[in-house]
Amino acid sequence: MEKVVIVGTGCAGLTAAIYAARASLSPLVLEGRQPGGQLTTTTAVENFPGFPEGVDGPDLIMKMHEQAEKFGARFQYGTLEEFKPGDDHHRIKVDGQWIETGTLIIASGAAARWLGLENEKQLVGRGLTSCATCDGAFYRDVPVCVIGGGDSACEEAGFLTRFASQVYLVHRRDTLRASKIMADRALANPKITPLWNRKPVAYLVDDTGHMRGIELEDTITGAREELSVKCVFVAIGHTPNTEPFRGKLDMDGNGYLIQHGGTRTNVPGVFAAGDVADHVYRQAITAAGQGCAAAIEAERYLAARE
């Protein structure tokens, strides 16, 4: 019987592991398909407090991992396949084996949706990203483009106008599907140029392996053109990693876990932290804060039961 099991090793999961370990709970931390989460795909993090010169994303994750281990957190590679809530404890199936735990902290994150074009994985962090707040400041006074037509795409495009010389908003239709206020705000910005009825078909790479542009196809005529940009921001949504909890924990229409005060879910002893529940901020520091809160709430839950 485990006291605390933590699912995920991004900022939320590792912060929860640090706090739970320091509380002498000896948490078991499950590393899934992408250990370290989305931060491992970021080559430079400039907005995490305490690093005025910035920090490499994988380095930051590694230091948090070492810190959690130092205090007694235990790590196990494995993917959570099934979840069975109970009254006294909960059961999770990890790579075919069942584990029982008094509390469960779900910090499995959310995966950005990508376009599925050639060389996509290699270009992440080299002129391809899904987070304007994270990476926008790296592209000052150069042209960039945003792919998408919803509220997130409009919000990302507006944010990027603070840095980029020009922001192209690429959408496969001739009208945005964003809310009217978001669409009107984006289209009224002189630094945002909409490119209607276009879909990306290829990334264009320079000799150094960085983005130099994107090839677009007209969805009506089929004509193709090259757009010269230094960065492509993909804003077509995220998919939270919550499938094993479907039908057992409260979720919104997009699959994000719903927090019922603090980080508590609708099942006592089960907590959600980070991008698995947060579709608004999606930042390393907010995920870390929720991981801290989840560990403290799990500790208090166990103490109350004892």
Image: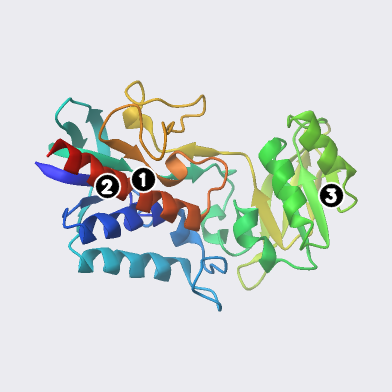
- Residue nearer the viewer, 125 or 6: 6
For the image shown, how many numbered marks are present on the structure? 3
For marks 1 and 3, give the one nearer the viewer. 1
**Label 3: few (<14), some (14–19) or many (≥20) C-alpha neighbours in 10 Å:** many
Question: Element type at marker 1?
Answer: loop
- What residue did someone put label 2 on? 6
Q: Earlier in the sequence, mark 1 or mark 3?
A: 1
- What residue did someone put label 3 on? 192
Amino acid under disc 2: Ile
- Residue 255: x, y in percent? 46, 29
- Residue 192: x, y in percent? 84, 49
Question: Element type at marker 3?
Answer: strand
Q: Residue farthest to the left?
A: 1
Residue 79 in view here: no
Q: Quadrant of residue 90?
A: top left
Report how far apart the C-alphas of labels 1 and 3 lie in the structure.
35 Å
Tell me, for residue 127, which label it has, or none. Answer: none
Report how far apart the C-alphas of labels 3 and 2 lie in the structure.
42 Å
Question: Element type at marker 2?
Answer: strand
Could you tell me which quadrant the C terminus lies in? top left
Amino acid under disc 3: Ile
- Mark 2 in CB contact with mark 1 (< 8 angstroms): yes
- For image coordinates 43% across by 46% down, the residue present is 274
Tell me, for residue 107, which label it has, or none. Answer: 1
